Image (tube, rainbow, N blue to C red):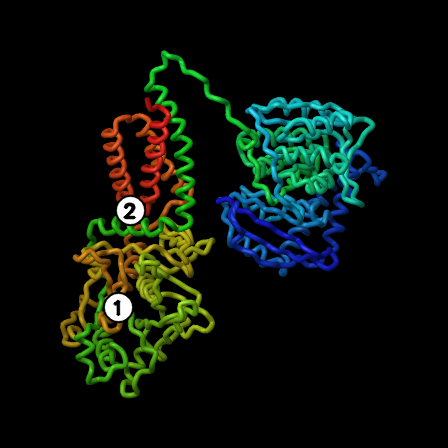
Amino acid sequence: MDKLIILKLGEGNFEQGFTVTLQIGDENVRPTVEITGELPPNPEILRDYHRWQSIYRNLRLPSRPIGLAKQLTQAPSLEYCQQVSEEFKVSFNTWLASDSFRSIREKLLEKLMLVDNIRMLLQTKDLRLQKFPWHLWDLLERYPQAEIALSAPAYEQVNLNRIATTSDKVKILAILGNSQGIDTKADQALLNLLPNTDITFLVEPQCLDLTDQLWEQNWQILFFAGHSSTQETDQTGKIYINQTESLTISQLKYALKKAVERGLKLAIFNSCDGLGLAWEFADLHIPQIIVMREPVPDRVAQQFLKYFLEAFARGGSLYLAVREARERLQGLENQFPCATWLPAIFQNPAEMPLNWGELFRNPPNLPASLSQTTPVRRTTNRLGFSLILLTSMVVTGILIGVRYLGVLQTLELSAFDQLVRLRPAEKPDSRLLVITVTEEDVQAQKPEKPQGSLSDKSLAKLLEKLEAYQPQVIGLDIYRDYPVDKDYPALAKRMRKSDRFVGVCQLSDSQAGKPGVKPPPEVSSHNLGFSDIAVDSDNVVRRQLLALTPAPSSPCTAPYALNVQLALRYLYTKGIRLQFTPDGAWQLGKVTFKPIEAHTGGYQGVDAFGHQILLNYRSSPSPEAIAPSMTLQQVLRGKLNADAVKGKIVIIGTTAETFGDYWLTPYITPQGKLQAIPGVFLQAQMVSQLLSAALDGKPLLWTWPLWGEVIWVWGWSFLGGLFTAYLHRFIYLSLAGGIAIISLYVSCFIFLIVYSCWVPLIPAMLALVVNSLIATTYLNMKFKN
């Protein structure tokens, strides 16, 4: 995922601190997150930087500055410069770890993933802040595909004057300025190695020659190598174009403005102390500028240019090319300290980041005619292959984007349900016993005046009979937010003292308007579990909620679900305890429970609150056949035996429809409707999943990472194009397409039953069909008659 981060450092100074605004969003869309923070006062950080700067500038290094006088009579050592740079890095990160800035840091950690392509813009008008090496921020270093750029607070998009051109090469104007004491010919040699370029070199030009070139041709890249400097008093940059002349950006204003309007995309100043140049150039609204923050040694400048051009010409983004080149400079830091601190990008926020491919105005024209001896079939296949290679990637990108927005979620969940229903049946879980309170049981208790579906008298008898047979644990999936009647002190004592009994309550949900349900007063907080269920938008239960942090105002404070409480007590007797991995995931025995995220499999943008996993129903003709069951009256009439109870998990709940404890499942009734089951059987399904995973090695449902799903979808998209390219008769194409769809369906089913992996079915099927249709349409238009 491509992310755009904008960090705005507003009014303030190092004595009073800086206000900070953070915006986070995907590339080319409006930000989805905006928060504010503050960088606290820290005059010492500025002094630390100036200390390092003074030492660095007084090193005896062959560099490209002019007008920077050495202030120290004795040059500092390279080791001392490295030491001071490490000290600045520590103090810089300490400043960025301040309490007032913590909200910014935590929001970035929350919203960004290690696989994201991250472009961060630092917007500030304080040149001192821009000079800081922000790439040293430890938070940025943890993301391998992130790079930070500088930006001016004021910007706008340039209206381009589109001029027709037939050039298929990248137009570069390379200025090789005053080369006194440095080797600009090395820069020239590196530029000449670039493929598909049209480069004009101006070697120590006169001002008029330079402006004429800027006015008369359409350039895409402006390159300068030579001496330059920044006047920090007025933030003015100056380039030395020959032995006697120097120019500021403002002195080239009209020519540069015209060049930008004609399509100038990138300016590279491979010269010293270039932030002043970038600052002035920003007023012309050029898309991107690359400069050096400080005086740059000649060899460092040459190596950076080499590494950058290699990475950029490979087709990578400008940001990642700069990062790669900057990091490769670390190999020179034994001779040239802090070489990696020097390169910086200056970005116009109104423009999209550049890549090498966008610089080509027109692709090369195809030959006007083909050889008459070339077989028609070979031509058709070659063009089809080129087409499907392109369209398969485009179709995949569009489908993944549409899927990310949740458009396909309903179809994917429906397809997933169908695959779930086709799985082979499993035996009931003999470790469980479900005792149901039916409508008949409720009617039979009427003389006892129950407050709910289960009276105190019936519950007292039931628990007495059950505990006589020594169950491992008893779970009551019936709300009792009222005390036990004083006529049943033994029941109250059993609920209070029994280490086998687990009660239930309901968490409050202010958004859904649910106040929650209090727990039984007699049950301790250690013997409580919540009954809350994670329900999908179509009201079907496909997820299992394991844990949740209750709201402070909730009457129910149980952090674990009822099914978790029951399973953990049973597993404890088997020598298995709940543990946590270093990243906070649950672990029971050898099984790690990876929690669901907002984008998991077919779920896109789901509310992944708490700790959730996918619910792997125990496959059976009906989800109610999860375990042996008996009704309340059967138990009270003595039809229960010790073998059905001893050492097992007993779950008590109501099936009476008048109490409305019914939940939709992926299974269907004989009438073709989704089957609803009582909550007590749903709790049994969840308990069984935890036991089966920890004790039987039954895999949990899981999904591929995003990159795996993208490759899978792209593969089927590519296959659909191949069919079109090589199967020219409609009957053959239809037959192959049908076989491919069946194969896709079977593959997804095999992955589910063998590996418990939820593989994208709908996106892959759409990719197969859509790319086949696109390729067919194109070839019919291209080769008809």
Q: Residue 752: which numbered mark, if any?
A: 2
The reply to whether residue 278 is visible in this rendering is yes
Front in this rendered view, residue 511 or 129: 511
Give the SS element for disc 1. strand
Q: Quadrant of residue 464?
A: bottom left
Q: Which residue is mark 1?
A: 651
Q: Residue 402: which numbered mark, if any?
A: none
Rendered view: 227 above or below 507: above
* Extreme-bottom residue of the structure: 487
Choose the circle earlier in sequence order: 2 or 1: 1
Q: Counting other residues with Cα less than 10 Å from the Cα at mark 1, is it few (<14), some (14-19), or many (20 or more)?
A: many
Q: Amino acid at mark 2?
A: Leu
Q: Position of residue 767 (x, y in %)?
A: 35, 39
Residue drawn at 51 percent across, 26 percent down: 363
Q: Marks 2 and 1, how far apart in space? A: 29 Å
- For the C terminus, the quadrant is top left
* Extreme-top residue of the structure: 373
Residue drawn at 14 percent across, 72 percent down: 639
Front in this rendered view, residue 154 or 627: 154
Give the SS element for disc 2. helix
Q: Quadrant of residue 359?
A: top right
Q: Position of residue 478 (x, y in %)?
A: 29, 73
Q: Position of residue 318 (x, y in %)?
A: 58, 36
Front in this rendered view, residue 614 or 560: 614
